[in-house]
Amino acid sequence: MNTPDVNPALQAMQESIDANGGIEFPEEDQQADSVHPQATLENSEVDGVAAPDMLEVIDSPLHKNGQCFNVQLYADGCLDCKSLVQDAQTDFKKCHFTAGNLHCPAQYFKISFIGEKVKWEKRISKIKAMPVGAERTDCMLGLIEKARDIESDDLRTQILGLIGI
C-alpha cells in the first residue's frame, strides 16, 4: 500500500498531540508558512483517489496565506443532511448520491464538529496530569458523570473512551 506524502507541519502537530496528550496549536508564523491549500490539493491524490471537483482552492485575502478551500454544496439543505453533517436530523433520499446525484457532497465529505471534543480532551489531560490521589479520583469521577450526560452518542462514546471507560 502506498503511503501518502505527509505535510510536515500537520505531522508535527499530530506528534505534539500524541506526546502531550492534548492539543497544541502551531505558532502563527509556522501555521501560515506550512499549510497552503493549493499544494495540499495538488498532493492529495492517493492510490488513484483525487480531490473531488466540488473542492477547489480560491484566493482569499481574509486568510493568512491568501488562499482557502471552497467546498461547493449542491443546495443549502445539504447542511441539514445527516449523510453529510454529524448529528444532523434530516435524511434526504432523492438528492443523495445513491440516488444518482453526482453533485451530492456526502459521497466525498463528512462534516464533524470538534470543538466540544477538544474541550473535553483538555479537561481529561489536566486531570490525568494531577498527582495520583483522592483529588484526582474525585475530579475524574465528576468528569465521568458529566460525560454520561452528553447528548451526542458518538461524542459521549469518544469521551468515555478517552477517559478509559
Image: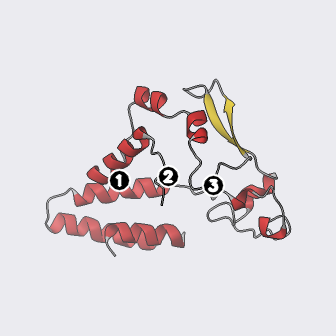
How much space separates mark 1 and mark 2, taking CA atoms?
11 Å
How much space separates mark 2 and mark 3, taking CA atoms?
29 Å
The numbered mark, 1 or 3, whose residue comes first in the sequence reads: 3
Evaluate if marks 2 and 3 touch, with contact meaning CB atoms under 8 Å apart: no
Q: Nearer the viewer, residue 129 or 72?
A: 72
Residue at 49% in and 50% down: 4
The residue indicated by pointer 3 is: 49
The label number, if any, that marks residue 115 in the structure image: 2
Q: Could you say where residue 73 lies in the image, as x and y percent from the top left?
A: 76, 50
Q: Nearer the viewer, residue 70 or 1?
A: 1
Residue at 57% in and 56% down: 47
Q: Which amino acid, by three-letter code, is at mark 1? A: Lys
- Please name which of the two marks, 1 or 3, marks the residue nearer to the observer: 3
Residue at 64% in and 23% down: 61
The label number, if any, that marks residue 122 in the structure image: 1
Q: Is residue 145 left or right of residue 130?
A: right
Q: Which amino acid, by three-letter code, is at mark 3? A: Val
The numbered mark, 2 or 3, whose residue comes first in the sequence reads: 3
Q: Is residue 136 left or right of residue 39?
A: left
Secondary structure beneath dot 2 equals: helix
Residue at 35% in and 71% down: 144
Q: Nearer the viewer, residue 28 or 69?
A: 69
Q: How busy is the neighbourhood of tag 2: few (under 14 within 10 Å), some, or many (20 plus)?
A: few
